[in-house]
Amino acid sequence: MLKDDKDRKLFFEKMVSEHSSKLYAHIRTIVLDHDDADDVLQETLIKAWKSLDSFRGDAVLGTWLYRIATNEALQQLRRERWKRLFRRGRVDESEAPKDMLNNSLQAGLVLDEALKLLSLQQRKVFGMRYFNEATYAEIALVLEIAEGTVKATYHQSMKKIEVYLKNHSY
């Protein structure tokens, strides 16, 4: 697909530029934690770089990247689950799926509660950016506010949610 190292590098740089923010948002919805999402995004990009020659082009590039990101995010969740189990001093595989389901449900409830702390404007911006992966420019256009305001509002929303999640971890 790619003729030489220069083509490969340019293709990869364009891919990162075009897909990183959407991949991050996708990963973040799975792992929830910002730092974990950053780590998973980095692992996703490394895996994509290493596998670039095997990308046949018969799949859409974004779909291929989302598949890698999803697998990496799920792997991160598995690592975290085992860390929690070891911290508790038990490794009971029969309880692991139950724990994951309970933790997923609880995480959803905690996120719902965190969203209630946001103002209506913050919820609009957060929802469009986080769940719908809209760009700052798209959000600004839809809400008829300045792009800088959108960025600041999103950042404030994320901080509120992160603080809430840290204080209400399970």
Image: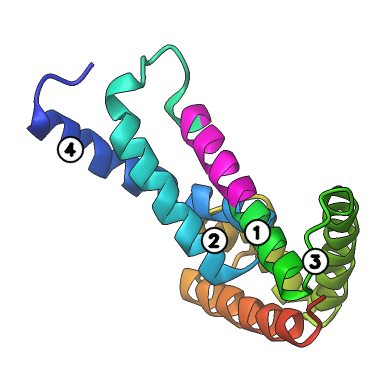
* Label 3 to label 4: alpha-carbon separation: 48 Å
Amino acid type for the residue under numbered disc 2? Ala
Q: Position of residue 97 (x, y in %)?
A: 85, 48
* Label 4 packing within 10 angstroms: few (<14), some (14-19), many (20+): few
Q: What element carries label 1?
A: helix
Q: Earlier in the sequence, mark 1 or mark 4?
A: 4
Dominant secondary structure of the residues highlighted in magenta in the image:
helix
Q: Mark 2 or mark 1, which has the lower sequence index?
A: 1
The residue that disc 3 covers is 90
Residue at 43% over, 27% down: 61
Q: Nearest to the eye among marks 3 and 1: give it.
A: 3
Q: Is mark 2 on a helix, strand or loop?
A: helix
- The residue segment tinted magenta is 63-75
Q: Position of residue 138 (x, y in %)?
A: 54, 54
Give the residue at mark 4. Answer: 10
Q: Where is residue 161 in the image (x, y as percent from the top left)?
A: 71, 78
2 on left or right of 100: left
Q: Is residue 39 above or below residue 155?
A: above
- Image side of residue 29 versus residue 10, left or right: right
Query: Mark 1 and 4 residues: CB-CB less than 8 Å, in contact?
Result: no
Dot 1 alpha-carbon crowd within 10 angstroms: few under 14, some 14 to 19, many 20 or more:
many
Callout 4, which amino acid?
Leu
Residue 149 showing in the rendered view? yes
Decide: is 29 above or below 106. above
Counting residues from the start of the chain, the first of labels 3 and 4 encountered is 4
Find the distance from the CA under tag 2 to the CA under tag 1: 6 Å
Mark 2, Cα crowd under 10 Å, few <14 / some 14-19 / many 20+, is many
State the residue position of label 2. 37
What residue do we see at 9% from left, 25% from top? 4
- Distance in Å between CA atoms under marks 3 and 2: 27 Å
Side of 148 relative to 29 (left or right): left
